[in-house]
Amino acid sequence: MASLLDIGRSAVNAQREALNVTGQNIVNANTEGYRRRDASLEEVSGIQSELTSVTAQTGLGVRLSEVRRAYDTFLSENKRSATARFESSDAFVKKLEQLENTILPTDGDLGVALTAFFNSLGEVASQPGDRAPRAAAIEMGHTVSNAFNTTAMMLTDLGEGTFQEIETRLTEAVQNVEALGNLNGQLRSSNFGANPPHSLLDERDRLIDQLSGLLPIHVSIGARNDAEIRLGSSVAGPLILSGSDAMPLTAMISDQG
């Protein structure tokens, strides 16, 4: 049977460990990807002695049973799905605004030039024998041609800029997938089984959150806490990460409508 001093010492040690966990939460309050830990204490049960068949009920004190990581799978998956939808919609709206600013009517744009050109043709039709309206119509024709060329160049620049942004985001996504592959290797090779270091799980979830802001993904967590990533919101999407194997991702422009 434990003495009062042994029981008291177990309480001091257990509470010290719990305070260490609390301190870790405080100092990492602003750390990106860090998830709060909770310390769980449990009684150290008494053991049955050789002198009695009844287990001692006084116990042996208290100990730290486990440190749990604050994580909700359902909330995390919904957050990632919402992030992917928001980022996709936000990028679409921004590009649509740029397209509208390019083609919507303004002073001296293509629409104004076409209107002036057709007005000049009307003047030619009403005064067929006068050379001045013809010269004005020819000049307006050159203006319309330049307006078409300018608009085409602006749309081409917009398309090229959009593709460059896609390549930049895809490069960042590839880096995240490769980092997740390395992390999967660490999780699979660890000897901690179902309880790997929480720091690895925090980093895994941080990388997945970043990736969900770049691409629509479907995430499956394996038995060794490694992440399997598929492109798209469905489990039937193409596999881009399995274990340590990261699949290459490339962007290309298709001429098909």
Image (cartoon, rainbow, N blue to C red):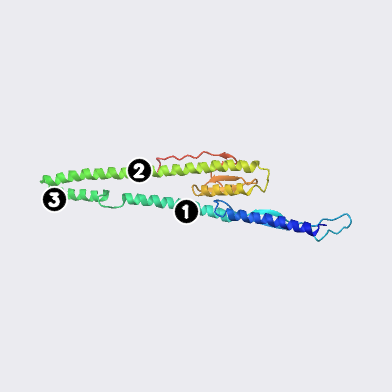
Q: Amino acid at mark 3?
A: Ser
The front one of 100 and 188 is 188
Q: Residues within 10 Å of mark 3 (few under 14, many from 20)?
A: few
Q: Position of residue 252 (x, y in %)?
A: 44, 39
Q: The C terminus lies in which quarter of the figure?
A: top left
Q: Position of residue 157 (x, y in %)?
A: 35, 43
**Residue shown at 60% from the left, 55% from the top:** 25
Q: The N terminus lies in which quarter of the figure?
A: bottom right
Q: Residue furthest front?
A: 5
Q: Earlier in the sequence, mark 2 or mark 1?
A: 1
Q: Are marks 2 and 1 in contact (CB under 8 Å)?
A: no
Disc sitting over residue 194 in the figure: none
Tell me the residue that label 1 is attached to: 86
Q: Position of residue 112 (x, y in %)?
A: 24, 51
Tell me the residue that label 3 is attached to: 126
Q: Position of residue 250 (x, y in %)?
A: 47, 39
Cα distance in 3D space between marks 2 and 1: 25 Å
- Pair 1/3: label in front: 1
Q: Residue furthest left?
A: 129
Q: Amino acid at mark 1?
A: Phe
Is residue 93 among the parts visible in the rendering? Answer: yes
Is residue 234 among the parts visible in the rendering? Answer: no
Q: Residues within 10 Å of mark 2 (few under 14, many from 20)?
A: few
Q: Residue furthest bottom?
A: 58
What element does badge 3 sit on? helix
Disc sitting over residue 157 in the figure: 2
What element does badge 2 sit on? helix
**Residue shown at 49% from the left, 43% from the top:** 172
What element does badge 1 sit on? helix
The front one of 121 and 150 is 150
Q: Is residue 94 left or right of residue 21?
A: left
Q: Earlier in the sequence, mark 3 or mark 2?
A: 3
